[in-house]
Amino acid sequence: MISDAGLYADSALLKKQHAWLNRYQPRLHVKEQGIVVSVGDGITWIKGLPSAAIEDMLMFADGSRAMVFDLNRELIGAILFYQTEALTAGTLVHLARNALSVPVGDTFLGRVIDPLGAPLDGQNKPAYVVRGNLEQASPPIIAREFVREPLYTGIKIIDTLIPIGKGQRQLLVGDEGTGRSALAIDTVINQKGKNVFCIYVLIGQKRSAIVNTIELLRQHDALDYTVCVVAEATALPGLQYIAPFAGCALAEYWMQQGRDTLIVYDDLATHARTYRELSLLLRRPPGREAYPGDIFFVHSRLLERSTRLNADHGGGSMTALPIVETKQGEIAAYIPTNLISITDGQIYLDSDLFASGFRPAIDISKSVSRIGGKTQHPAIRDQAGKIKLEYLQFLELESFSRFGQKLEASMEARIKRGRLLRELLKQDRLAPESSEFQLAWLIAYNDGLLDTLQPAQIAGELVRLKQTVKESPLALNSDLQEWRQLLINVLSDKQANAA
């Protein structure tokens, strides 16, 4: 024991060190240590670490990081998140003893980050005080609330015929090049000024596509309330696998703070292929189409975290728009059917409609929203109630009329109205419409105020109608007669000008 304590009386630090030295007792420290057996294709095999468990984080002596993904009798399979050039066979490995997490908070708004929270936009690392676990149980039933509020996308077909509520999971499905990502971007842009935080997760995409998406959001001032979580095609497969879970952790933090959030997973077909690649490399037994048997569980445990919480648990919501690609319109393929069964509805985009010039190319007959109808504003719900059935009947009549048979006058009238409705449902990209305008054109169509127009005149008439609604003080809760009088005045003005 060091007894001359008077020598350290003038320094608190030296006194503290002196006390520690007096208490110090040599003893045996046990620490597990593994060794890398092989490295390649984004995975590594490790020998040792007998207490390692699935999803434990691993720290390598060279600074690389990985997560335990497979356990067998002799070796541990791990997926790499960060790999240095010095990582080779023989490198020492230790358990990090903490769960995989990502920093979360308001400082991430407007930023582009990778799935581990590192900035990719050339700016400083965002400050944070909280971290969110990537793997977390979904909220229990007692913490959930009914989906009651609408989430307006600004897209006429969706907001009127396939509505989405806050806390809903709505799948966007279709072939490549049919406008799935464009729908998601339009929805994010339409949240401007609506107090909804957005998270856009880009999985396995080319850098040019990622840059285009970010620039579109920036040009429309949508990046101010959005976080982009990016794992591009050249990133390690492990990063691509955890990217949707990182975005979910960010959205979950805001949801628990009572905020409304919207998260886009672009796309889960690429995510499933990445998971299949990792599983085959780790010699897991393949199932249907070589996907591992738990691919359904992976996506369900991700999407189940999207919900609306009740007031006792924050009252926030997480609306999810997962995107999945089909091949040649095969909606019954393995991954799309899995996701259709998990989500609360799907919006199907058809390549034939896209080629014919109908944009957005949404096939209404194959699209459904199972809970969104209950969230619609009563005025819009009343007006849109019969339009979907009327439009589907028109499509059937139109296909029948192609055989050249003479139709009754009532049939011809219904086909003419159907063609008007088809023109009304068309919409340009990056041009979201207000909910008041949606109500206005619905009333005008249902009351027959547009029946005198030709389909080619609809686009110009909608521009006039949009400007009139924008300058009008009427809102969704305004009296229906006031809306009708406004629309009649607009139509009368049109007829007078035509005369």
Image: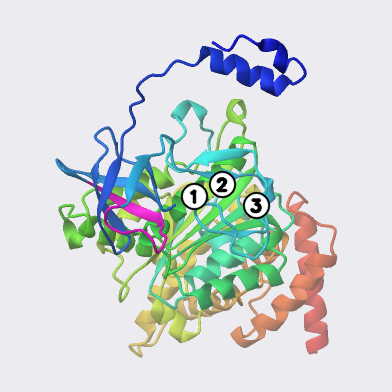
In-image side of 313 versus 75 (left or right) = right
Q: Which kind of residue does numbered mark 2 sit on?
A: Leu
Residue at (33, 27) in percent of width and height: 30
Q: Position of residue 376 (x, y in %)?
A: 60, 49
Residue at (40, 79) in percent of width and height: 351
In-image side of 448 versus 249 (left or right) = right
Work out whether residue 147 or residue 204 is closer to the camera in this orientation and state it: 204
Q: Position of residue 182 (x, y in %)?
A: 54, 71
Q: Which stretch is magenta?
A: 76-90
Contact between labelled residues 2 and 3, with CB atoms less than 8 Å apart: yes
Work out whether residue 384 or residue 192 is closer to the camera in this orientation and state it: 192
Q: Which residue is labeled 1 in the image?
A: 246
Helix, strand or loop at label 3? It is helix
Q: Which kind of residue does numbered mark 3 sit on?
A: Phe
Q: Position of residue 163 (x, y in %)?
A: 54, 55
Q: Name the quadrant containing residue 445.
A: bottom right
- Mark on residue 250? 2
The answer for how far apart the CA atoms under marks 3 and 2 are is 9 Å
Q: Which residue is labeled 3 in the image?
A: 108
In-image side of 148 versus 13 (left or right) = left
Residue 290 drawn above or below residue 138 = below
The answer for how far apart the CA atoms under marks 3 and 1 are is 12 Å
